Image: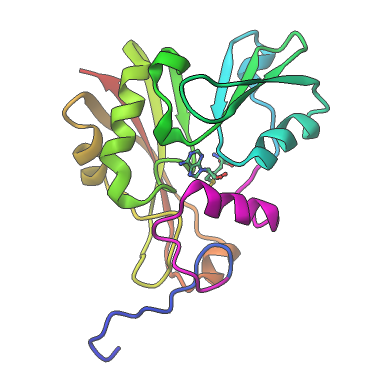
């Protein structure tokens, strides 16, 4: 290093574009190019147990593919609170996916949840929007909501992200005034993909948040 900040950093899509401030249209572009290695095809087992499952994704391709992968028929309705649609399963499974910009919707439309599973969401949004993110999530929580937040310790001086590094202090800064935060698990998540980003370590942590 010559003392200058390294500006050519690889991102998770395998190129050197600056991904520190991605907007929904940038994610759409990545979905369009099928640069979605983060994606894990799965059906939420909670829906099989009869629970209402709600997801949110800005890329329409991602929403459609979710239902197509499951071979699950669906309908769509336009949203009123913001631009976008909600995809709803028309089977006995109660699954809805809101297709819109997370930062444009609120608990008025989403309602409140008993449980929130946050994988690749808080850690994928621009770091500067973390407080804004928590201001949308916390009104969807009630006093007994369990919010599980999956995060990573990652060196973003080498790797352009997303994900963006997220320490317990970062979570406290965003959510600490309204929630109690407890780390419940951590694991070494370093693999070939992370090695290709030039990283030496990659640690996944799981936090549980509950309203104060
Ligand atoms: C790292 S991926 C994780 C996807 C999924 N949670 C998973 O675990 O496979 C981040 C996802 O967030 C979506 N996204 C990014 N910014 C968004 C926003 N402002 N509103 C809604 N979705 C957004 C992207 O399109 C992308 O699919």
Observer able to see residue 58: yes
Say how many tags the image has.
0
In the depicted structure, whether residue 189 falls above or below residue 75: below
Observer-nearest residue: 5 or 169?
5
SS majority, magenta:
loop
Q: Residue at image x 26%, y 85%? A: 4
Point out residue 111 in the picture as x, y percentages from the top left corner.
43, 12
**Which quadrant: the N terminus?**
bottom left
Residue farthest toward the left in the current orientation of the protein? 177
Is 151 displayed left or right of 73 in the figure? left
Observer-nearest residue: 9 or 77?
77
Q: Residue at image x 21%, y 38%? A: 172
**Which quadrant: the C terminus?**
top left
Point out residue 132 in the picture as x, y percentages from the top left corner.
29, 37
Asked where in the image residue 96 lies, by quadrant, the reply is top right
Point out residue 154 in the picture as x, y percentages from the top left corner.
38, 59
Is 20 displayed left or right of 99 in the figure? left
Q: What kind of colouring is applied to the model shown? A: rainbow
Residue farthest toward the right in the current orientation of the protein? 71
Is 6 displayed left or right of 113 in the figure? left
Is residue 176 a member of the stretch shown in magenta? Answer: no
In the depicted structure, whether residue 169 falls above or below residue 161: above
Observer able to see residue 183: no
Is residue 18 a member of the stretch shown in magenta? Answer: yes
Residue farthest toward the bottom in the current orientation of the protein? 2
Asked where in the image residue 181 lies, by quadrant, the reply is top left
Q: Residue at image x 69%, y 41%? A: 61
- From which residue to which does the magenta span run? 15-40
């Amino acid at each position: 290093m010559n003392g200058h900040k390294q500006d050519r950093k690889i991102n998770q899509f395998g190129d050197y574009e600056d991904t520190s401030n991605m907007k929904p249209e940038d994610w759409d572009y990545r979905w369009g190019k099928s640069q979605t290695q983060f994606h894990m095809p799965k059906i939420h087992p909670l829906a099989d147990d009869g629970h209402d499952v709600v997801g949110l994704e800005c890329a329409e391709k991602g929403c459609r593919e979710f239902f197509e992968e499951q071979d699950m028929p669906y309908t769509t309705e336009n949203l009123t609170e913001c631009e976008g649609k909600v995809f709803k399963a028309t089977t006995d499974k109660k699954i809805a996916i809101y297709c819109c910009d997370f930062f444009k919707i609120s608990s008025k439309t989403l309602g409140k949840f008993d449980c929130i599973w946050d994988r690749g969401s808080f850690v994928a949004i621009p770091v500067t929007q973390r407080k804004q993110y928590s201001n949308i999530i916390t009104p969807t929580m009630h006093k007994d909501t369990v919010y599980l937040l999956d995060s990573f310790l990652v060196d973003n001086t080498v790797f352009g992200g997303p994900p963006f590094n997220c320490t317990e202090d970062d979570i406290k800064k965003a959510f600490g005034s309204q929630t109690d935060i407890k780390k419940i698990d951590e694991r070494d998540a370093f693999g070939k993909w992370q090695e290709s980003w030039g990283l030496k370590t990659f640690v996944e942590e799981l936090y549980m948040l509950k309203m104060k």
